[in-house]
Image (spheres, rainbow, N blue to C red):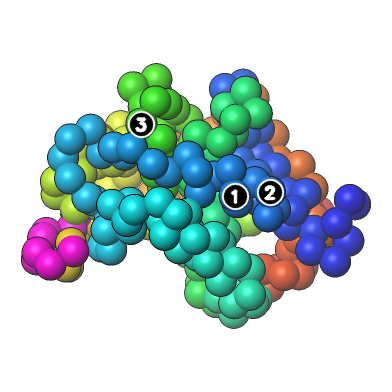
Amino acid sequence: MAHPYWPLFDLSVRTPRLELRYPDDDMCTRLAGAAGGDLFAGTGNQFRLDWTSDPSPERERRSLQFYWRCRAELSPASWNLPLVVLVAGEPAGSQGLHADDFAHKRSIESGSWLAERFQGRGLAREMRLAMLHLAFDGLGATEALSGAFETNVRSLRVSQSLGYSDNGEQVMMRGDRPTRVLNFRMDSATFAALRRQDIVIENLAECLPLLGLREAAGSA
């Protein structure tokens, strides 16, 4: 392993179109710089906190602090993997996974963003599929949860196109505005129908103890 003390730096999920990789400091810096511009096609902020409108370099500094905090607070009991989306080696966005007590619950939540110039190519669906492959095929999840504000039409369409089922709704603050959140759930049977043979996970086994696991889902 290139990073025996923090093997997550070697974790990778590859599809024919993109790669998900756990970012080191250099990649975090590049990813922070990629988050400028309009991430939501003129629909306004779709995050709970509107960090995307912060002026540079405050926006980039807050992004770096988030990535560092994910590392510092990671434990088998609670972890957050903010994977960078690489397209032809260039950071295009982030596809994150979060779980609490995953070893027992086998439930993950996800969130993502895609830089403006990479939108409209079907990459949002491809990166979600790569994440689901890691969650179900790699980690042995039994469910994957997702949610988006009702105004985030693109995210909702990705969940619906992949066959997530409705999982209720709630009202949360979007900046200073209460907004309805639509929740979705995918189970392992639904994922099995989506599973592709051209998605490859690399260097997962060494990461498992950090996530509270003993062996990958496909291990004997």
- Camera-side residue: 190 or 63? 63
Classify residue 131 as left or right of residue 203.
left
Residue 26's label in the rendered image is: 2
Q: Check disc 3 and report its element: helix, strand or loop.
A: helix
For the residue carrying disc 1, how many other residues have a C-alpha within 10 Å: few (<14), some (14-19), or many (20+)? some
Report x, y in % for residue 91: 56, 36
Residue indicated by mark 3: 116
Report x, y in % for residue 125: 41, 32
Report x, y in % for residue 132: 51, 44
Q: Is residue 135 magenta?
A: no
Kind of residue sitting beneath label 1:
Thr
Q: Main secondary structure of the magenta part?
A: strand
Which residue corresponds to the image point at 76% horizontal and 60% vertical from the top-left?
A: 207
Classify residue 136 as left or right of residue 24.
left
Per the rendered image, the range of residues in magenta is: 175-182
Label 2 – label 1 distance at C-alpha: 5 Å
For the residue carrying disc 3, how many other residues have a C-alpha within 10 Å: few (<14), some (14-19), or many (20+)? some
Kind of residue sitting beneath label 2:
Asp
Kind of residue sitting beneath label 3:
Glu
- Camera-side residue: 174 or 213? 174
Q: Going from the N terminus, do you reach mark 1 or mark 3 first?
A: 1
Report x, y in % for residue 104: 57, 75
Q: Going from the N terminus, do you reach mark 3 or mark 2 first?
A: 2
Which residue corresponds to the image point at 68% horizontal and 73% vertical from the top-left?
A: 212
Above or below, 37 relative to 17? below
Label 1 – label 3 distance at C-alpha: 18 Å
Q: Are marks 2 and 1 in contact (CB under 8 Å)?
A: yes
Whether residue 196 is visible, yes or no, is yes
Classify residue 11 as left or right of residue 152.
right
Q: Check disc 2 and report its element: helix, strand or loop.
A: helix
Residue 29's label in the rendered image is: 1
